[in-house]
Every structure is written in structure tokens, then in C-alpha cells.
Amino acid sequence: MTPDPQLVQVVTICVLVYFVLLNGGYLMLNFLAMFALRRRSQEAVLDDLPQVYSALEPPISILVPAFNEEATIATSVRSMLQLSYSEMEVIVINDGSSDRTLQVLIDEFALVPFPEAYRIQLETKPVRAIYRSTRFPNLRVVDKVNGGKADSTNAGVNAARYPLFCCVDADSILQRDSLQRLVRPFLRDPLMVASGGTVRIANGCEVRGGFLTRVGMPRNPWALFQVVEYLRAFMFGRLGWSVINGMLIISGAFGLFRKDTVVAVGGYNPKAIGEDMELVVRMHRKLRSRGIPYKIEFVPDPVCWTEAPEDRKVLRNQRIRWQRGLSETIAANWGLVFSRHGGVVGWVALPFFILFEWLGPVVELFGYAFMTVAWWQGWVSWESFAIFLFVAIGLGILLSAFGLLLEEISFHLYPRASQLLTLAAVVVVENFGYRQLNSWWRLIGLYKWARGGEAKWGVMTRKATWQRDL
């Protein structure tokens, strides 16, 4: 049965308009990111000068929630202890690990039980013990009952002694000047309450003694796709939103926060599966409702390296979890949308995320299916179908290529021509299957959230192939 031609035309126009708005929005973020990177390139001249400490940098507590991280925890903690910063402490929170995470820490850093005052500002699962390293005076380990990453981070906030805390994933490797770069927004602007850094894929790289010694490309295709994906998300996604103070996400892998502000808004939500985004959006909502001026900024320098999943099932579970986290965050902070005090966040950023990130999987997959069937059945002309492919796939390739270009111009992390050619090929190939598969996984996440039920983190298997012995 042939559908009403007028209905087909209306649906076709709606699908095309949606994809034009989607890619047009990302293109605007591209231009904003270019503006920010141009300003950064002017300031980067000072980076070549000898770096000295003024002793006025605010001290920082580095919080490392860890659950079953025995494969990477020692290397990660070692890299954090060797960061070049004037005053800092490292607090590892062992969240009831069932593997040898705690024992590895005890053996590697000569930990001993240390009775100390533990001020409870945020409610968490019970703390079993606190350990201090006999080799590194600024390293402590909090051992607690399992409660999830958010609960562990809250326990770290309770134990933190300094006004700023940096939340870092247990499988992350930080560059030596990471904290120096991440703290700059706080030194420049007293209204700053949080800053986030770029996260890059460590798969294929080489780490020795806790430091990244060689930047490489992963051989695993799933990890390779994620390299381009992270470039696109961080290089013009978060950087673009940061320019207009509309950034909604600071990655849980690497973010710096003002402790008193986080405590004032209630800390991380242990019930939220996307606790990093939920905290940032809640900070926006509560600070705006109280009329408190603030700023949240993104630091584009590549400062944090983390392991990406190389297994399809693990990657699938991760993307389903991310979509559920996005759904929970939007539902919990719906009052900010188009509110009187919403500002850029409530009137631009959140509506954009609702339309293109939250509901995106539904419209995108429907658009692909409808236009393919309509062309196959002869309901639309091949010219209309070609325009759709250009808008949906061609512009997607252009945007990914733009992100790669910005990375090459600004940071040049991948020095070999073969690496750039590989990434250029991935930029094209990912649009024919991988992005559509991602949309399908996100649709599953949206369905699971709508259906309700308990959300689980799932298991993230660490292979740590990038680690090398000293």
C-alpha cells in the first residue's frame, strides 16, 4: 500500500530539517571552539618559558575512586604522585574491591593503618579504615564498603583537606603538568567553581614508570573508532559550550572542583548512573536559582589518558549506561529548562541536549529507516535520498574531519603521517555503521530508562596493554 504522498513529503522535510539543525548546531560549536583555540594559541607562548611556583597556587586533593583496579592502580597512583605541583595530596578510595586492589596499594606504597579524624560532610557507606603511605607522606587510602563511584568520591571529599579536589579515574594517566593547566581557570577567575580537562585514549600508547612515553594508535578497531569519537566530543563539543558558559559535562575521568560548592549542592548523587554530568547540571541549576555568579570552564590541553573498552559488549554496555545517565540527569533537572534564571544553560545548552542527544537516537534511526525504505519503494526521488545522505553522513564526516584538523593544528599529538592517515580513514569509515550502531545502543539506553528498573554499571575489563615495566 502506497502512503499518502503529502505525508511522505512532510516526514521527509522534517527528517532533513532535523539533520540540518543537528549538524548546524555542531558546526556552530566548531566555530566557537576555533575562537577558543585561537585565544589559547596566543597564551601558549608563555608555556615555553621556564615554569616556576609562586607558592600561591591553591592546594589540591586528588581523589581516585577504585573498584577492582588491580591491573592499573599502581601505575596510575605513581603518575599522580609525580605530578609537578606545589602542594597536593592523593587520596585513593577503595570501594570494597573484590580483587587485590587494596593489597596492591599496600605492597606498592608501604601503607599502614592510620587513625585520623574523618569529618562527614556528605553521607556515604561506612569507612572501614584509613591508610597512610610510609614512602609518600601525601598519599592516603580510604577503604570503605562498596557503594559505587559517586559514593566513593563523596567519601574522598570528606577526607580531602584542601579547598579544591580533582576527581580522577583509577585507570587514568596524567601528564606531569596536568594540575598546573587545570587550575589556571581558578587562578584567572575567582568565580570559577569547576574545570574539566581533555581525555584521550591510552590504548596503543606506552607508559613507563607512571608517565606516557610514547603516543601510539590502538590496533583494536573499537578503540580506534573511539579515538576519533573523543576528539570530536572534546575538541569542539565541550570546548564550544565552555566559551558561552554552557558546559554540562565534566568527565569523571578528570575534573577539578571547588569543594565547598560541591558540598553545598549535596555532593555526587549515589543513585545517579551518570554522576559526573548530574553533578555539573545540578550545580548549574542550584547556583542559578540562588543567584550566585559562577563559571565552569573546559581546558583543551590533552592532560589525561585513559583506557577505552576494546570489546563490543563492554562498549555497548558503556554507551547504554551513558544514555541512561543523560536521561536521569535531564529528568532530575527539568526545572532548569526555559526557567527564568536558566541563562545559556536553561535556554540553549539543555534544550540542545534534549533535542539532539537525548531524543537523537529515536529521530536519527527513524530517519535512516524511513528514507531508505521511501527511496527503495520509490516514494521519494533519488535526489531527495542523495540530499539526505549528504546531510546525515556527509556533514558527519565533515564535522569529524574538522575535529581532527583542530587537534592537528593545536596539539599535533599524532606526529607520524601514517597515524594521521589512519585517523582520516576512521573519520570516513565510522559514519558507515559505527555511528548508527552507537545510536542503536543509545536507543536501548533510552528505552531501559523509560521502562525503569535498577541501573547497573556493568564490568569494565582493564587489559592495561599500554603499561610497560621500568
Image: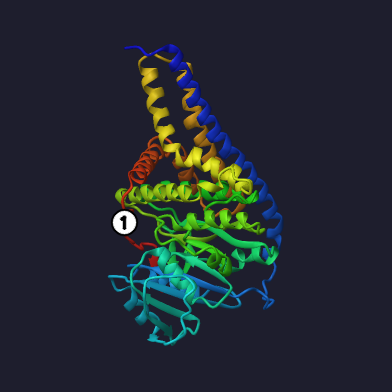
Q: In this view, does 461 lie above or below 26?
A: below
Q: Between 437 and 456, which is closer to the camera in this rendering?
A: 456
Count of all numbered marks drawn on residues in the image: 1
Residue situated in front as seen by the camera: 167 or 172: 167
Q: Which residue is drawn at 45% across and 42% down?
A: 358
Q: Quadrant of residue 127?
A: bottom left
Horizontally, is 34 left or right of 380 in the view? right
Q: Position of residue 143 (x, y in %)?
A: 37, 77
Residue 184 in the image: state x and y as whole percent.
65, 65
Residue labelled with disc 1: 458
Q: Nearer the viewer, residue 424 or 31?
A: 31
Residue 91 position within the rendered picture, expressed as x and y whole percent measured from the top left: 46, 75
101 left or right, relative to 351: left
Picture quadrant where residue 186 is located? bottom right
Mark 1 Cα shell of 10 Å, populated few (<14), some (14-19), many (≥20): few
| 356 w.r.t. 321: above or below | above
Quadrant where the C terminus is found in the figure: bottom left
Q: Nearer the viewer, residue 132 or 295?
A: 295
Q: In this view, does 201 lie above or below 105?
A: above
Instruction: Say which residue appears at 62% left-offset and 54% top-offset.
Output: 288
By what rule are the colours in the image chosen?
Answer: rainbow
Question: Quick check: 248 above or below 181?
Answer: above
Q: What element carries label 1?
A: loop
Which quadrant, please, contains the N terminus?
A: top left
Q: Is residue 33 visible?
A: no
Q: Is residue 366 visible?
A: yes
Image location (x, y in percent) of residue 2:
35, 12
Q: Which amino acid does label 1 sit on?
A: Gly
Say which quarter of the image contains residue 52.
bottom right
Query: Left or right of 444: which side holds 232?
Result: right
Which residue is farthest left? 98
